[in-house]
Image (cartoon, rainbow, N blue to C red):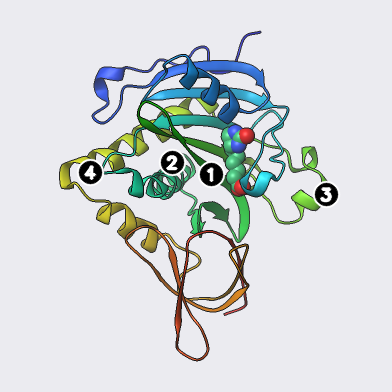
Amino acid sequence: MPSLYDDLLVEPAKFKSFAPRIFSYSLVTSTNEVARGLIDQNAGDGTVVVADSQSQGHGRYDRRWESPLGGLYLSLLLTPRIDVAHAPLLGLLCAVGAAYTVHQISQEDALLKWPNDLLLKGKKIGGILSELVIGQEPLAIIGVGVNINIVLHDLPPTVRENSTSLAHETGRKFSLSEVLLALLENVDKLLARVEASNSFDSVLAEWRRLSATLGRQVVVTGQFREVEGYALDIDELGRLIVQQSDESEVIVSIGDVEHLSM
Ligand code: BTN
């Protein structure tokens, strides 16, 4: 079956940090699962799996990720660059790249909700699912889903309530091939900066600038216990630092954030 991305022309030589090798499909279970299968066949850094829709798209905590036609669904294989401890930062990097891409194509300001949600006008427009595979070399599978041309009625009511799409907010339709190319270029530029400085500091700075979470009262669930407090900062590994009402600080590495009112 042909895919919407079959016409995509990528010139790997124009990329500084990775050479994209694109596998495009009309329908897959989940691009992350296809990418995992390709690792078993020796696929490596720069492999991109993209699909027009997914039958079993999933998000963090194995939640279903609704994947009707019109969304961008891709998984990118990346080696962790500095070292494996920094692998979680690749998810933040791709979230920054996705926010840049939304702005580049639509002039809309997407913001980031810790750890890796993309918000537009306070509603979820995208998310990132990072997984780490430790084989011959460690490889991160970064799954990116963004509601680009999705018609909100194609989402179940419970999801629709808190979600939006770029087409819904702008009244325009976008070429998914162009969006994919812009995203890969933005991720490449961010990675090239990481490599040049041997640090993720520039990514962390951009994540902070685009953050909808920092500076707010939040409740974080999903770690050992619920943590409530003021979202102070992220640390050098992208973990969220929450200041509780008694001024003590808790560092959260995984969890779901709820933004409380300002
Ligand atoms: C989340 O918000 O929980 C993360 C959502 C990640 C969805 C993307 S779509 C492409 C890739 N394939 C999947 O099954 N999930 C990710």
Q: Secondary structure at mark 4?
A: helix
Estimate the x, y position of residue 245 in percent, counting from the top left.
53, 89
Q: Secondary structure at mark 1?
A: strand
Picture quarter with ligand 1: top right
Amino acid type at circle 2 is Thr
Estimate the x, y position of residue 227 in percent, counting from the top left.
58, 75
The answer to whether residue 244 shows anywhere in this view is yes
Which residue corresponds to mark 1? 128
Amino acid type at circle 4 is Arg
Amino acid type at circle 3 is Pro
Which residue corresponds to mark 2? 101
> Farthest residue in the bottom direction?
246
The CA span between labels 1 and 2 is 14 Å
Question: Where is residue 236, by image quadrant?
Answer: bottom left
> How many C-alpha atoms fall within 10 Å of the one at disc 2: few (<14), some, or many (≥20)?
many
CB within 8 Å, label 3 to label 2: no
Seen in the image, is 25 located left or right of residue 154?
A: left
The CA span between labels 4 and 2 is 17 Å
Q: Quadrant of the N terminus?
A: top right
Estimate the x, y position of residue 36 in percent, counting from the top left.
53, 25
Which residue corresponds to mark 3? 157
Which residue corresponds to mark 4? 193
**Which is more N-terminal, label 1 or label 4?**
1
Which is more foreground, mark 3 or mark 1?
A: 1
